[in-house]
Amino acid sequence: DIEMTQSPSSLSASVGDRVTITCRASQTIDTSLNWYQQKPGKAPKLLIYETSSLQSGVPSRFSGSGSGTDFTLTISSLHPEDFATYYCQQSHTTPITFGHGTRLEIK
Amino acid sequence: EGQLVESGGGLVQPGRSLRLSCTTSGFAFGDYAMSWVRQAPGKGLEWVGFIRSKTYVGTRDYAPSVEGRFSISRDDSKSIAYLQMNSLKTEDTAVYYCTKGPSSGWYSGYYFDLWGQGTLVTVSS
């Protein structure tokens, strides 16, 4: 199975900050990497698919990059509604696997 | 855009069975793979499995943790997907989400652009 390692596991930041979350795959997954945002009590929401494609309706302050085994999600300027938990997920092979999540909290 | 609504969750004893349903609307259900993802209380996301569209003979794939115990099926005439869970264990306690992929095709079930609200399954004696 491909193991997905996210860092950091939690992060405190302020409105307006630039934030980067990283995700590392245990083996190469080309660009088959997706990012989700989840708020408490809600279903996850797809933000970025295939490393860098922005899902329809997602603000342009979200961006993704990387290839192979190392990937990043960047929020260019945090808005209050961005405080949530973020998960990466590989869609290269089954079993499909997720990172353990990064909890983004208000400083 | 579409909508997914899960039902069938509840409290069940270890070793028993439960079937979840995912009622869909607003998209061409028969063209898409349908997947299930679960989340144990306070934990992260875990893929459970998917079933491809009839174009791909409805082939299925499952996470190792549920292989042989869980089964996914679909009724294209009703636009409903099912998750049959047998031999339930306490570690199967989770919110179960129904999801679909953003495109049709072989890889349709590999990531998820539409999610239901989830249904809680509690396995306890």
Image (spheres, coloured by chain):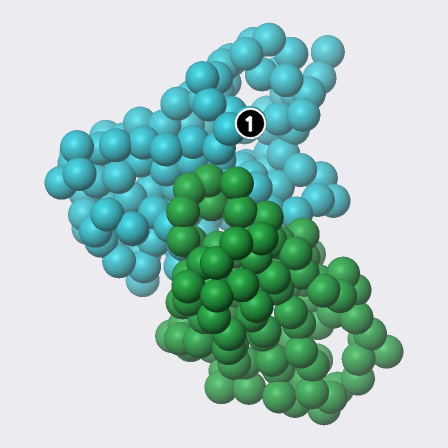
Chain colours: A green, B cyan
> Horizontal placement of B51 versus A9: left or right?
left
Query: Hey, which quadrant is residue B61 in on the image?
Result: top left
Give the answer, above or below, for where A33 lies relative to B121.
below
- Given residues A42 and B100, the one toward you in this image is B100
- Given residues B96 and A102, the one toward you in this image is A102
In the structure shown, which secondary structural element does the residue marked by tag 1 occupy? Answer: loop
- Given residues B12 and B15, the one toward you in this image is B15
> Horizontal placement of A15 versus B64: left or right?
right
Q: Residue B2 placed where, x, y %?
A: 32, 56
Query: Hey, which quadrant is residue B62 in on the image?
Result: top left
Q: Residue B17 placed where, x, y %?
A: 51, 13
Task: Give the residue at x 37% y 37%.
Answer: B50
Mark 1 is surrounded, within 10 Å at the Cα level, by few (under 14), some (14 to 19) or many (20 or more) other residues, namely few
Give the answer, above or below, for where A29 lies relative to A14.
above
> Horizontal placement of A57 versus A13: left or right?
left
Q: Residue A57 placed where, x, y %?
A: 42, 77
Task: Give the residue at x 58% y 74%.
Answer: A73
Q: Which residue is mark 1?
A: B65
Task: Give the residue at x 69% y 81%.
Answer: A19
Task: Give the residue at x 62% y 82%.
Answer: A75
Confirm whether residue A58 shows in the render: yes
Assign the C terminus of chain A to one quadrant of the image: bottom right
Q: Amino acid at mark 1?
A: Ser
Give the answer, above or below, for where B29 lies relative to B63.
below
Q: Which chain does the residue under circle 1 lie in?
A: B
The residue sitting at the left extreme is B55
Q: Residue A105 placed where, x, y %?
A: 79, 70
Query: Hey, which quadrant is residue A32 in on the image?
Result: bottom left
Confirm whether residue A39 shows in the render: no
> Horizontal placement of A51 versus B88: left or right?
left
